Image (cartoon, grey):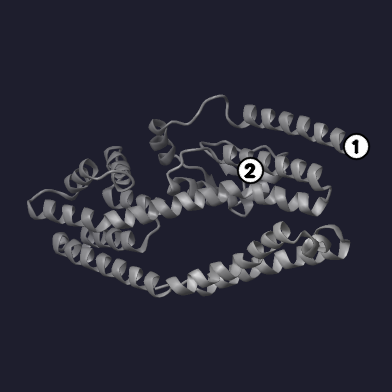
Amino acid sequence: MSATDFLITCAVLASVFALSAMLFANGGRAVTVDRALVRRMSRPEITGGGEITREGFRAPSEFRLINLLARIHLLQKLEEMLWQAGIYARVSDVLLIMSILFMFGVVASGAAWGDSMIALVTGGGLATLPFFYIRMRRRRRLKAFVEQLPYALDLIKSSLEAGHSLMRGCQVVTAEFADPIGSEFRSVIEQSRLGLPLPRALEEMLKRVPEDDLRLFVVAVKVQSEVGSSLADIIGRLSEIVRTRQRLHQQIRALTAQSRMSGMIVGFLPVVLLGAFSVMQPDYTHTLFYDPDGVMILKVAIVLDALAFITIRQLLKVKF
C-alpha cells in the first residue's frame, strides 16, 4: 500500500470514528452555562466497582477502555480539572477531541516521515494539547481567585460588622466581584437556596477551588457554626494571612526568576542551535536527519533534553 492510500484510509477511519463518537457522546446538544449549575449539583461519582453512575445509570461492560479509566479515577480527575478551569464541557467531548488529534498526528506525521515512532510521538503530543490547555486555564483561574479572595474577605467582614448574616455577605460578593470568585459564590448561594447548609456549600466550593487560602476560610466558617465565635474578627485576621502568603509567594517568584529563566534557556538552546545550523550549514546536520545512526542519536537527544527540562522545572518548584 502506498503512502497516499494509507493516508486516505486513515482519514476515512478517523472521520467515521469522530462522527460515531460525537453521535454517541453528545446527543446533538451543547452544554450551556445555565445548565452547568445543575450539573454541579449532580456530578458523577465513581463506585467501588469502577463504573460511572449517575442516578442509577451503569456503563455497559463492553466499553472496556472507559471502565479502565474509571477504575483509576482518571475520568473523575479530568472532570474536576474541567470544573476548576471553568470549562463547562463533557469529559466525553474532551476525550473525543484528544482521540481525533492523536489520529490526525499519527496520519500526518506517518505520511510525511514514514517513521512509526515519530508518528506515535507526534500523535501523543497533539493528543495532550487539550490537557495542557485545561491545566493552563485551571492555573489562571485559581490564580485569579486567590488574588480576589482578600478583597472578598474584607467585604464579607464589613458586611458582618454591619449586622448582616454570612449569607448576605456572600450575596454582596456575588454582586461586586466578577468571575471567578463571583460565579463560585453564586453557586454557593444557589446551593444554599436548594437546601444545602452553607458550610457544606462552602466545602463544595473548596472542591472546585482547591486552594489553601480558601480552605482556611471554609474551616473558620465551619468552626464558627459549630462552637460559635466572632466570625468578623476571624475573617479579618484571615484576610491579613492571605495577603502575607501572597507577598511571600511573589518574593519567591522574584528570587527564583533568574534560575527559572536559566533552565528555560538551557532546555531550548539545543533546539535553537540545531535549527540555526540546519539553515546556515545544512552539511553539519545532514547526518542527524538522513543517516540511521544519526536519526537514532537525535531521538535519544530529544528524550534526554526533555527529561532535563522537566527535572530543572521540578527542582525550581518551591512549596510553602
Of residue 74 and residue 273, the one placed in the foreground of this image is 273
Please identify the residue farthest to the right as the structure is shown.
1
Assign the C terminus to one quadrant of the image: bottom left
Residue 69 horizontal side relative to residue 261, left or right:
right
Taking 279 as reference, is 305 above or below it? below
Q: Which amino acid does label 2 sit on?
A: Met
Image location (x, y in percent) of residue 217: 27, 60
Image location (x, y in percent) of residue 201: 32, 48
Residue at numbered disc 2: 98
Task: Estimate the spatial distance between the alpha carbons at disc 2 and disc 1, rounded to whole Å.
Answer: 27 Å
Q: Which mark is residue 2?
A: 1
Q: Which mark is residue 260?
A: none
Mark 2: which secondary structure?
Answer: helix
Residue 118 horizontal side relative to residue 191, left or right:
right
What residue lies at 17% left-to-right and 60% top-to-bottom? Answer: 231
Of residue 180 and residue 74, the one placed in the foreground of this image is 180
Of residue 13 and residue 74, the one placed in the foreground of this image is 13
Image location (x, y in percent) of residue 135: 50, 53
